[in-house]
Image (spheres, grey):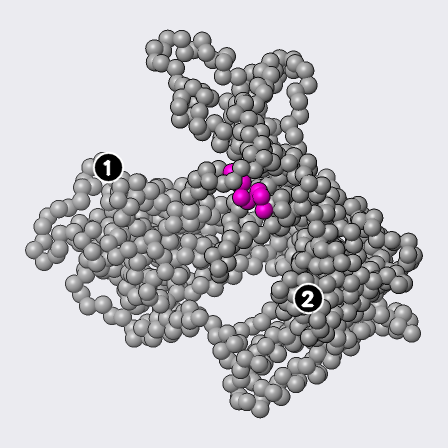
Amino acid sequence: MSAMWEAGETITTEAPALFKKRSGTAYLTNRRLAWVPQGGLAPMVSVKHIDIKTFFVSKENAARVMVKVVENRPDTSHSFEFPSSNAAKERDEFKDAITAVISARQSRTAASTPTPGGASPLVSDASAPGTPKTLMNASRAGPSGIKRPLNGGAAAAELRVRVALLTQDKDLATLHKDLVIGKHVSEEEFWESRKHLLRNKTVMDQQQKGQSSAWLDLKPETGESNDVKYVMTPQVIHSIFQQYPAIKRKYDENVPDILSEGEFWKRFFQSRFFHRSRSGRGANEPDDDIFDRALEEDEEETKNAPKRMRLDHIDKLLDLSTTEEDHLESYTSPDSTMAAGKTKGSKEAIPLIRRFNRYAQRVLNSTVGPKRPSTGPEPFSMSGVERAIVLEDLQEQKEASRIVLDIQDTRRYFESQGGDLKSSKIPENQDPADILDQFYRDFASYRVVLNRPFTIPPSTFDTLMKDVKVNRAKMMPPQDGSQLLPPQLYQDALACHAAGNEILRHFWSSTGADKAAKYVRMVESLKKVRDENVKALLIQASSLDAACLDALKMMLKPMLGAIQKALKHAETRPKPMTRKLVQ
Amino acid sequence: MKDTSTSEDDSNLLVIVIDTNPFEWEHPSAPLKLNQALQHILAFMNAHLAGRHDNKLAVIASHVGVSKFLYPTLNELTPGSKVQTKKDANVYQVFKVVNDAVISGISRLLQDPGPTLQEKDLGSSKIAASLSLGLCYINQAVRSDGMGHVKARILVLTVSPDSSSDYIPIMNCIFSAQKANIPIDVCKIWGEDAVFLQQAAHITEGIYMRPDDPQGLLQILMFSFLPDMFSRNYLYLPGQDQVDFRAACFCHKKIVDIGYVCSVCLSIFCSFSPVCSTCKTKFAFQPLLPSARRLVKGAASSPSSPRPSTPAI
């Protein structure tokens, strides 16, 4: 199938269609519109998205249901007729899909990005030299990974990523609307500070989905009239070929010369090959010379053990046979449960296990590549073994030569924390010994008696309660602006706050001499935010009630403070230089 | 804020560190005599013991030059030191043992001025030593309790100002307590705020109190420090939680927002010097790029740097 579709191409819409009175199937993939004749391997008609100029559909009640696609090339058009019973529906699907393709293309700016690798040669690129072409899908960049931006292509790609980001992130879109459309910040400046978002998005878009490693499970869809329907997509067909190489061989031999593609698959689903691993169906399938032979081949393949690997150059550390001498003393019978083909159970299981193994190997090969054949005998190197068995933790550690921390005076730490040095004051004229003596006599002269009433001043309780109340107020969950303000006003306040902060960021980043013009613009924007946006909010709030106004004022206070500070900075900034640059 | 590691059935070990600095208690301006204060403190201890049958208590005296266990007395072999066990019909025996042990212990401590007079830094209490003793005692108690029921806390009743030479030992104690989940409650009975202990309470999630009037000490103790760790989940307790963490530079004692920090000993300086004056480490690199230096200077001159604001509510 890989011959038919390019890598990374996926089918969005498909339907049986007549083209020049030949029956076949029309496909719309993520890259092109294609038509494949019945039993054909490659598309006979292939029109890339960018080459679709326009298209026409037949009238709702016309006798024949048709779609006509006009290419950009002069006088080139293709008409497809939908012959099936629900042709109208199929036609509409195509109509919608192509409309989407064309409108998506028109919404993008015209710029050219070279398409790396794998482009279909069917479309004449030369027919429209210099025609701007857009990259339809970032994933098209192919396995080479991140696409290399070239000339104008980068701008177009970035523009697309920006649009995608804005549609994804509502908050960002609001901010963008406020700042860019409100003419505070230019488009470029807005994105300048969000380069990481763009980069992230680009990388995410370019990540390709790998091949599925799931074991193919063909499940029929059961229709209303108890008929069984298998849906064959290129992916499913690809998986069948991956899993059963015998089928791939038969397909290559028979299609399309002997059998048509549909016929081939129809017979496949009826064959013993397909049903052998399914329960519920006996051997009542009709004989089918193609698939019965495939079955034989397949079983032959799994019956024979795969070629033994040459075991000459096994890593010494993995070679279990080298430890054999350690087990001579044991008298237990050898374990044959894991020996291939020795027991009855394993004999039955082996083909299945081999099948799984083969599949697993294929999945591995498709991702990590085939195993490299061993390149001759590896010299038995002691260093490799040593590396593996020597434990670093058991080695004697060499003492690193350290410098002893030599702190001259730890009091300095205290001083940096507690301010001035202070200590208990001992009156100058007194001998410490005397004080101690006095202290002892005082203590001894008076017995501590507990069964005497305590005299607690009433102020103690009041102070404690005041303290408790303060702490309680602090522990209460803080009131959120969303509870204090009506939802719409709260949203507006958030947007205003975000916009203000963004402008502030731009303001402070433009303090350099080379950005004087932007600096002046930001000052104007800040003034505008302060005098217009915030004021409008406050007027709105004051029309509601006083509590609302207070809450709003409190919310916006830090931002207004920051704006004030910024404007003050602007005033004290040496004027002549700015003026000169602005004029 | 509810701490699920505590439960109603916990046995509470309260380690009380009493600061017995004679130079503070005996100071003419002291609002309370030691034995007056002891009356309050002993009543509080008894209240703690009365709270639950398995509540435990340890009392450590933090004196000048020496720090000692007052209760329980650990293998004290001095003659005549045996706690009097004479029964008193009017007093619950457990209370009496504790009261007698504390009073006689302090009395013995004061009797011998030797270690105090040998102390170089006269007037600074051995808070760090007492905290270490307390932490060791708690560690022992928690380990011997296989059920994990013992929940310990430390209460420091102090009158002394911070002792500047004790900074590093105290900080080590604070971090050990924090790691072992032991809150350090602090009551600075009078005087200036004790900066280290304030930080100790803050870091270990204990309570710091500095009463305005120490005459009502018993009420303050009962109100703030009696509730055990489990009850604290449900109570609003007095105590302040705002701590001044601002640092001053080592060279000029100026409070700085942005400064230079020695990468070896963490000393703070307001300007770059090629040799750290605290630990003598030599720095072989240039301070900062000119543009960055300008930024630091600008920020240091206006304390609140121009930073985008955040919503207040």
Residue A223 picture location, percent across and down: 50, 58
Q: Residue at x 70, y 78 (%)?
A: A529
Residue range corresponding to the magenta coloring: A266-274
**Is A430 displayed left or right of A440 in the figure?**
right
* A126, above or below A104, in the image: above
Quarter of the picture holding the N terminus of chain A:
top right
Depth check: give the residue in front, A157 or B175: A157
Residue placed at 73% from the left, 63% from the top?
A81
Q: Taken as a whole, is the magenta stretch helix, strand or loop?
A: helix
Asked if badge 1 and badge 2 are on a common chain, one would say no
| Residue B278 against residue B226 in the figure, above or below | above
Where does label 1 land, which residue? B75
Against A70, residue B99 (above or below) is above
Element marked by disc 2: helix
Please name the amino acid that badge 2 sits on: Arg
Q: Residue at x 60, y 50 (%)?
A: A232
Do the residues under discs 1 and 2 have CB atoms within 8 angstroms? no
Residue topped by disc 2: A91
Instruction: For mark 1, give the secondary structure.
Output: loop
Is residue A181 at all visible to an observer of this figure? yes
**Callout 2: residue from which chain?**
A
Q: Residues within 10 Å of mark 2 (few under 14, many from 20)?
A: many
Mark 1–mark 2 Cα distance, whole angstroms, equals 99 Å
Q: In this rendering, does residue A506 appear at all?
A: no
